[in-house]
Image (cartoon, rainbow, N blue to C red):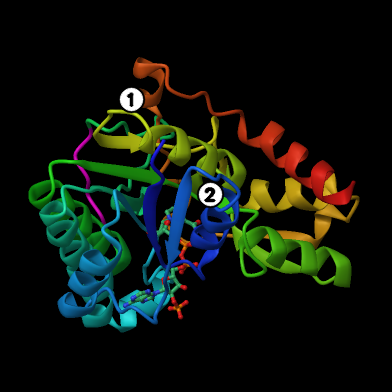
């Protein structure tokens, strides 16, 4: 069997790191990992990578994903999240390669906990969400062999995620505030990477939502992280970001996953418990 050459961009980021670590162990893959050393906003750099390595799959994990930073650096956010995705889409198409574009629940926003399916119309409110949606659109239009995978609140891949932030607060016995009115689904990086690997090897294309089942607020997520590790759950305090009594939800419903039967995501609480147990043992 010939090896698949897989180019992973944003390989030093949270998801990229996990994907490289995981896929590198499979001898059927040859992994090419790049981060800012290959700037995806520079078409010449992207074209050169495609010509030299001739990947069969490009997984785009490169992103400016700090929501507040994106608000203040709109041009940079669109350059990386939209133009970068466009460059990868046109170049991968030229090589007849598949592109896997990572995206986010932030392309949606509503006030009900009914999840957004792949068939709902996006309505991003933030620069981050808008730039990620623009990236999706480029990929969809420019390479027919595309997979767009949207996920939410991914934890477990890095020292900089929400889980580590809350855990540090717990360890230090430090009180902190998080939104009680912002809802989505915490998603384990293990499950997300599992799904990406499975999907990329199938003759499947289009948009897939990939979040753990169920939903919670940032506040509930923090409480669970603290209590499962034996820390004082009262350290976390509620903060309100919107109108009183109103919730802001970006929760995704994995409808395509369910209809195709390709993968089954666990409940977010079970996945979190399992993740923390594995980490402690
Ligand atoms: N983490 C989550 O909770 C989450 C949830 C839903 C969807 N996603 C999506 O999943 C993907 C990966 O997210 P992540 O959390 O792993 O992001 P991340 O940790 O911010 O990683 C992105 C990586 O891309 C690099 N990068 C930035 N500009 C670049 C450029 N011009 N060329 C090449 N690389 C560049 C970043 O470098 P610097 O750090 O130096 O900027 C970083 O190493 C993104 O598409 C994101 O939208 C993430």
- Residue 123 on the magenta segment: yes
Q: Which residues are magenta?
A: 120-125
The reply, left or right, for residue 147 in relation to residue 27 is left
Residue 148 is labelled as none
Choose between 276 and 129: the one closer to the eye: 276
Q: Is 143 situated above or below 52?
A: above
Residue at image point 61% right, 53% down: 155
Q: Are marks 1 and 2 in contact (CB under 8 Å)?
A: no
Q: Does residue 94 lie above or below 203 as drawn?
A: below
- Percent position (x, y) of residue 139? 17, 52
Residue 245: x percent and y percent? 48, 46
Q: How many marks?
A: 2
First of labels 1, 2 by sequence position: 2
- Main SS, magenta region, reads loop
Q: Residue 23: which disc? A: 2
113, 71: nearer the viewer: 71
Q: Position of residue 225 (x, y in %)?
A: 75, 50
Q: Which class describes the residues within 10 Å of circle 2: few (<14), some (14-19), or many (20+)?
A: some
Residue at 28%, 41% (x, y): give it: 147
Q: Quadrant of ligand 1?
A: bottom left
Q: Is residue 118 left or right of residue 43?
A: right
* Residue at numbered disc 1: 256
């Amino acid at each position: 069997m010939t090896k698949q050459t897989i180019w992973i961009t944003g390989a030093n980021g949270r998801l990229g790191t996990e994907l490289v670590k995981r896929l590198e162990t499979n001898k059927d893959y040859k992994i090419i990992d790049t981060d800012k050393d290959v700037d995806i906003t520079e078409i010449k750099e992207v074209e050169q990578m495609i010509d030299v390595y001739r990947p069969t799959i490009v997984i785009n994990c490169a992103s400016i994903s700090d929501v507040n930073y994106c608000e203040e650096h709109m041009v940079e956010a669109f350059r990386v999240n939209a133009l970068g995705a466009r460059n990868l889409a046109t170049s991968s198409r030229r090589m007849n390669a598949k592109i896997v574009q990572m995206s986010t629940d932030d392309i949606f926003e509503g006030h009900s906990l009914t999840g957004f399916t792949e068939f709902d119309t996006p309505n991003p409110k933030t620069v981050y969400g808008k730039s990620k949606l623009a990236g999706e659109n480029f990929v969809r239009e420019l390479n027919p062999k595309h997979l767009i995978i949207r996920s939410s609140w991914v934890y477990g891949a890095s020292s900089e995620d929400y889980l580590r932030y809350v855990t540090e607060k717990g360890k230090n016995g430090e009180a902190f505030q998080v939104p009680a009115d912002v809802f989505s689904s915490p998603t384990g990086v293990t499950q997300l990477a599992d799904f990406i690997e499975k999907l990329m090897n199938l003759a499947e294309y289009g948009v897939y939502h990939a979040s753990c089942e169920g939903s919670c607020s940032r506040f509930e997520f923090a409480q669970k992280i603290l209590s499962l590790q034996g820390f004082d759950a009262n350290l976390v305090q509620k903060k309100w970001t919107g109108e009183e009594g109103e919730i802001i939800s970006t929760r995704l419903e994995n409808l395509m996953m369910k209809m195709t039967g390709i993968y089954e995501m666990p409940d977010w609480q079970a996945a979190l418990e399992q993740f923390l147990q594995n980490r402690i043992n």
